[in-house]
Amino acid sequence: MPQRRKNGPKLKPKRPAGGAPFVATVSVEMGQGPGAAARARALAKALGPESGRQLPGSRVTIRGGGPVGTVELRIEAHSLRALRAAVNSHLRWASLAVEIAKVAGERPGDE
């Protein structure tokens, strides 16, 4: 049952027209110049297992390693709450992968 605020409307997220799921697209740029595409591929590979687990109520598609060094995450969810959770989780995992690479003394994709 939807919650009610005092003297306010019901709080219930609405889906976009057509009953489509809520969608967020997140692009992570891995820099420019030599090695950017390799770093993007490494990040996409690092996020792969996490996206395969699928958080409840969401689905994630990862594309990365193109010539511009960008990783794109397309996150679909059946509710705003699930969308927020999935976006936050994937952003944290991406940040963690980059930080681990820095601590290890190299950036993702550097060989």
Image (cartoon, rainbow, N blue to C red):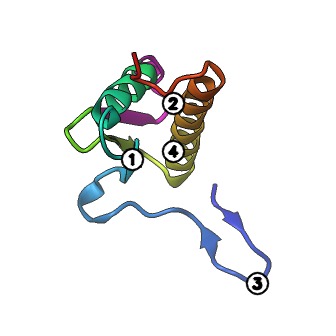
Assess whether residue 61 is covered by the magenta stretch: yes
Q: Report the residue marked by disc 2.
A: 56
Mark 3 vs mark 2: which is more N-terminal? 3
Q: Report the residue marked by disc 1.
A: 29
Front-most of residues 18 and 110 = 110
Which one is in front in this view, the residue at disc 4 or the one at disc 3? 4
Tell me the element at label 3.
Answer: loop
Mark 4 vs mark 1: which is more N-terminal? 1
* In this view, 33 is above or below 51: below
Q: Report the residue marked by disc 3.
A: 7
Instruction: Tell me which segment is drawn in magenta.
Output: 49-62
Mark 4 vs mark 2: which is more N-terminal? 2
| Residue 32 in the image, given as x and y percentages of width and height | 34, 46
| Residue 44 in the image, given as x and y percentages of width and height | 37, 27
Assess whether residue 11 is covered by the magenta stretch: no
* In contact (CB < 8 Å): disc 4 and disc 2: no
Distance CA(mark 1)–CA(mark 2): 27 Å
Residue lying farthest to the right in this orientation: 6
Say what amino acid the circle numbered 1 marks.
Glu
